[in-house]
Image (cartoon, rainbow, N blue to C red):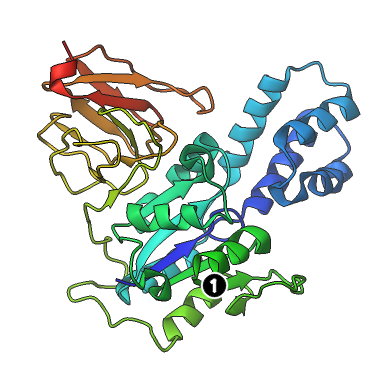
Amino acid sequence: MPLLLFDLDNTLLPRDAAFRAWAQDFLSERDLPPGDVEWFVTLDGGGYVPRSTVLSAVRRRYGLDISSDDLLTHYRRGINSHIHCPSRHIDALQAARAAGWTLGIVSNGGTGPQLEKIRRTGLGPLVDGWVISEEASCVKPDPLIFEIAAQRCGIAPTGDWATHTWMVGDHAPADIAGAELAGLRSVWLHHGRPWAESGYRPTLKAAGLPEAVGQVLAARNAPSPRPGIRAGGPARRRAGAAQARTPGATAGVTALVGARSGVRSAVTAPAGPYAPVPVNVGTAGALGSGTGSAVRNRSGELAVAEEYTGTSTGAAMSLAEPSAVEPPTALHAAAGGPARTRFAVALKVEPAAAAQ
């Protein structure tokens, strides 16, 4: 099955426009010079300057009596309130889906903020899986993160999988260099910029996402349309598997949600530290009843982008709320009790024998 992977910020989502809108709001709320928005944009560096650096500079420039944590909270809530997925991007994703492609997101960044963008913009139902660098302990251009993405989309990164996979992104050192290292073809979104790298090049260049998807679909190896798939229809649901790569992992399952929910299949404790865990949490088995999605994760944390509701049966289940997620909405449950969360939680399942 051919795979089409996308970067998130400034590829699927106009992140820089959302940052500019937040900066304008920030200046307006404090009656500061509106022209300073260009100072904010320059300091931001397209999102590649650490947030701590950006926000510390903002505090000093205006002598703000606000803690770094409070300012970070204001920033994250503000930028995400302005983030959106343009309708033409949604149309492009639906066209690729109808043409037979499997779709995934590969994003560098913090787990909570990136998942909040996926949730707010409705991208989750439009793709088959996603991976975010913080939760995966793996950052583009490392080829491993692309393999993880393939696994979460239900495609085993073995054999000639790379020859049937494309990566679309705007950041050359992460997206295009990463694709080349992984053996993938790529489309660089130039956004009016000249190509400046000499050591590698994208397969194709495009001004924006719709053009990039059109180029991929027009490529000679584009797949035939999937039987029974119509334009704009829901993604085919699958229960793929991803493998943990952390030596010495325990027999219990530490799961990460990085794929769509929908298929309900049983989840049981793996036989060993590298055993696969199904992508989708099921209606029976170790997790009991529920809806949600889970795949094995190197970092040992869970990032939930859709609501999970479940009860444990014959296993110990613990939920923990990461501090990076805003607003926190997780509810905690003791072993054997019901649990419900709306966004990001850590979920650990131990074999029934160990849950005494």
Q: Residues within 10 Å of mark 1 (few under 14, many from 20)?
A: many
The N terminus sits in image quarter: bottom left
- Left or right side of 108 for 307: left
- Can you identify the residue that label 1 sits on? 186
x, y percent for residue 225: 27, 80
Q: Kindly state the secondary structure of the residue where label 1 is placed.
A: strand
Residue 123 visible, this angle: no
Q: Nearer the viewer, residue 223 or 26?
A: 223
Q: Residue at point 41% right, 76% down? A: 163
Q: Amino acid at mark 1?
A: Ser
Q: Which quarter of the picture shows residue 65?
A: top right
Residue situated furthest front in the rendering = 248
Q: What x and y, as percent, mark residue 292?
A: 26, 38
The residue under the point 14% across, 44% down is: 265
Q: Is residue 78 visible?
A: yes
Image quarter (top left, top right, bottom left or bottom right) of the C terminus: top left
